[in-house]
Amino acid sequence: MDSVFASIVQAPEDPILGVTVAYNKDPSPNKLNLGVGAYRTEEGKPLVLNVVRKAEQLLVNDQSRVKEYLPILGLAEFNKLSAKLILGDDSPAIQENRVATAQCLSGTGSLRVGAEFLAKHYHQRTIYIPQPSWGNHVKVFTMAGLSVKNYRYYDPTTRGLNFQGLLEDLGAAPAGAIVLLHACAHNPTGVDPTVEQWEQIRQSMRSKGLLPFFDSAYQGFASGSLDADAQPVRMFVADGGECFIAQSYAKNMGLYGERVGALSIVCKAADVASRVESQLKLVIRPMYSNPPIHGASIAMTILKNSDMYNEWKIELKAMADRIISMRKQLFDALSAKGTPGDWSHIIKQIGMFTFTGLDSDQVAFMTKEYHIYMTSDGRISMAGLSSKTVPHLADAIHAAVTRGC
């Protein structure tokens, strides 16, 4: 008798995670994985921060700790500290109890919980996301019941921001529509608006009553400064308006597999925040009941202890600085080779990723001939590079660009 699932077709690999699957199958000793957004050391190894090891040791040594269920919204102190990290120590929204925060399953889980809440409680079902955006955004919002539309963001000719197109598209969006904004280090392009451009975006959105939904996956990891990377979010909160913020500790604390994140909803008044919080519980309870305890306890331990917090900031800046240094080394290597084209976008872009401008044929060539793995849109993870592998990548890019010339 046939399986009741006999008609199910084989699903394609995830376009990002599938890169690693292909990389793992390649026997070449020169293979290089620039697909997945996870930090690597100069030796190409995953990094556990020293401060994370210390926090974990403290937790393990504390015999009073138990494994009981957390409340639906997670660790209350973690939530308070997370809101403070993104909104600032002196945020009026926090002081006035206008922020509802839930510990969620990293950035993806925070986005999904926020999207489910909006689909149930908000009058507009349309969310505008930048073109391009992280591959999972469309799926997360669609699965939650929102309708996804795009606004112009990246300009392939300048390999920079299409600011005019962005303002036009947001200006044409229906009143009250939700707008997804990458708080910093836009994924996949590495192109961020300037502070002045952010201010124009804020004014434009507020004048139309558009609802900002920030995805903050890289706070402190982009520039090396936690405050600088949070500035766009704080500008929107400072005007007294409402917004959603999804936070992830995957990159900035290296807690990838611990799935540590938070969703904060900034409301107009404390009584609204209280009601929003009560409804957030009803979204989360049938989804996963309550979040895991270990990763959030690590983050909370670091955030509440001033010595550990300062140590974290130093380690975080070291990661950001290494990525900035890889950008410079790659740009210098391509310049030295005289590779055709303007490659200055490599040093202008920020964060974990560079949007190289290479097309899917060039990417396929680099994978086949040089065993370099990346997503087909030409996005490379700068964190996967090292001084040793930059020359190999520069050779591959040069060959791909000059092929057939």
Image (cartoon, helix red, strand yellow):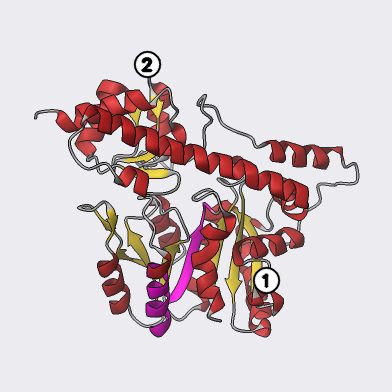
Viewer-nearest residue: 281 or 34: 34
Residue 15, position in %: x, y? 36, 41
Residue 204 lies within the magenta run: yes
- Dot 2 alpha-carbon crowd within 10 angstroms: few under 14, some 14 to 19, many 20 or more: few
Residue 94 lies within the magenta run: no
Left/right placement of residue 25 relative to residue 172 reads right
Question: Looking at the figure, which quarter contains the C terminus?
Answer: top left
Marks 2/1: CA distance? Answer: 53 Å
Which amino acid lies under the numbered mark 2 shown in the image of this protein? Ser
Which amino acid lies under the numbered mark 1 shown in the image of this protein? Asp
Residue 275 against residue 66 in the figure, above or below: below
First along the sequence among labels 2 and 1:
2
> Can residue 293 be seen by looking at this rendering?
no
Q: Residue at x 51, y 27 (%)?
A: 42
Quadrant assignment, res 272: bottom right
Left/right placement of residue 175 relative to residue 366 reads right
Residue at disc 1, secondary structure: loop
Q: Are marks 2 and 1 in contact (CB under 8 Å)?
A: no
Residue 295, position in %: x, y? 69, 46
Question: Looking at the figure, which quarter contains the N terminus?
Answer: top left
Viewer-nearest residue: 236 or 90: 90
Residue at disc 2, secondary structure: loop
Residue position marked by numbered label 2 in the rendering: 28
Left/right placement of residue 73 relative to residue 126 reads right
Q: Residue at x 37, y 63 (%)?
A: 129
Residue position marked by numbered label 1 in the rendering: 90
Q: Which residues are magenta?
A: 197-218
Quadrant assignment, res 393: top left
Q: Residue at x 77, y 48 (%)?
A: 307
